[in-house]
Image (cartoon, rainbow, N blue to C red):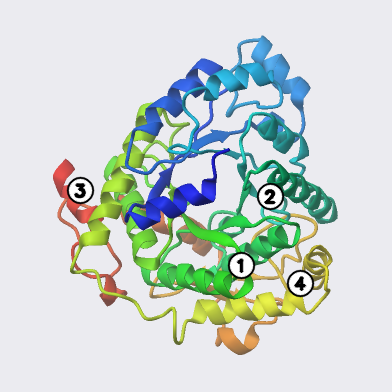
Amino acid sequence: MTSFGRFVAAARARGALVVQPRMGFSAPARMRAGLAATKGAADAVAGTLTIDSYTRVGDEPSAVRALGGGVPLNGYPITSYSPDTSRWVLDGLADASFPVQVRHGSAHPQRIVAALARLGLTATEGGPVSYCLPYGRTPLVDSVRNWQETCERLAALRTDGAEPHLESFGGCMLGQLCPPGLLVAISALEGLFFHRAGLRSVSLSYAQQTSPAQDRQAVRALRRLAAELLPDTDRHIVVYTYMGVYPRTTRGAHALLADSAELAVRAGAQRLIVKTAAEAHRIPTVAENVRALRIAADAARRAATATSVPEDADDVADNPVYAEARALVDAVLDLDSDLGSALLKAFERGYLDVPYCLHPDNAGRSRSHIDATGRLTWSDIGAMPIGRVTGRRGARLTATGLHDALTFVQRRYDQLDEHSVHHSAAHPEDAGRTPADALLLQEA
């Protein structure tokens, strides 16, 4: 069986950033064509089967009715097709040079994982917190139990010689307006949850936010925490291109994508989940996914070879994101020796509190804002035990301020012109031409 972790490590050894789309189609022929097109898009590409919304919530009857009526779904209904159909989709494509990961968004993923295992696939993603709070009202206690069972099912594949891989979605909570310290902490805690359930190959995620300098601190903090918490685990860091309100212009979207690739390279991540220029408008086509993969891979190569890109030292000393994340992780681990129970207690007490998240099990007392330098910081920490490391809290957001914060990145990148230096002037360490600038000038 293909090892997702070994594939990423091999790419890293030859200096390549693994790039990966978030692509899923309900028609088997189209899904197969999408995998075939993306397989050769760049030097190191991971394939994706993104699952549809009906399957994510366990509503296979609705998925089957839609398929029977010729209604396209927003992903691949892996539990509704026969294994033979799905094997045909993958045949001759999924291999050691092109591992395929199943991405789904489910708080009860047992049937999805059983289906992917029947196909010989061994890589998926999610987590007890990250695939519960943002996506519905499934009680957190149910999600923790479901994910414990899922992790044990995946870990059991090791008895057949496989090395199953599970990626935490914890660094992507709500996509935006969640300060990096909390994203890093949740991702690290979920990685530890996976490890304690028997998995030995994991990846921890972080979604690009509003400040390049802060994002680099966050990725480096996540790397450091992973080394401390998971020393005997095959692990890597995956960066997500910005998941909030996306630029509407092609130029702005491509610049944001290229900057996320630069972030991954500069901060030491090994994999990047890309977004396309179509994100603000509709589900992207296969061709748009291929173009996004190529832009990201090109930007990553440029970042790796650019002599003007300085080395950062904020992973060693005075990294405020690490200090905040470490305080949160330590507080949660002190609550209970069983990590699932500790996570439940942490949310009950507000030790973990995702801003603007409406899930009933989230305390909802924390708030965030974007400060004058473009960094995403706390305006209210609620009951989270980080007062000693966060410093002064910021001003509360008004309704107008919330709108401005949600569209901060979109407006910044849509205002680019072909000769702009598009990083914020508030970050002098980011001044100068970057890989994204070079790509934009090429396309002008």
> Looking at the image, is 34 positioned above or below residue 229?
above
- Measure the alpha-carbon separation of dots 4 and 2: 19 Å
Question: In which image quadrant can residue 200 be found?
Answer: bottom right
Q: Which residue is mark 3?
A: 440
Q: Which residue is mark 1?
A: 232
Give the residue type at disc 4: Gly
User: x and y percent of residue 242 in the render?
Assistant: 45, 53
Tell me the SS state at disc 3: helix
User: x and y percent of residue 257 in the render?
Assistant: 35, 49
Classify residue 250 as left or right of residue 86: left
Viewer-proximal residue among 162 and 72: 162
Of the two numbered discs 1 and 4 on the same chain, state the one appearing first in sequence. 1
> Looking at the image, is 252 positioned above or below residue 91?
below
Q: Which mark is residue 131?
A: 2
Q: Which residue is mark 4?
A: 350
Give the residue type at disc 3: Leu
Identity of the residue drawn at 37% across and 81% down: 313
Query: Label 3: few (<14), some or many (≥20) within 10 Å?
Result: some
Contact (CB < 8 A) between labels 3 and 1?
no
Question: In which image quadrant can residue 350 be found?
Answer: bottom right
Mark count = 4
Classify residue 400 as left or right of residue 257: right
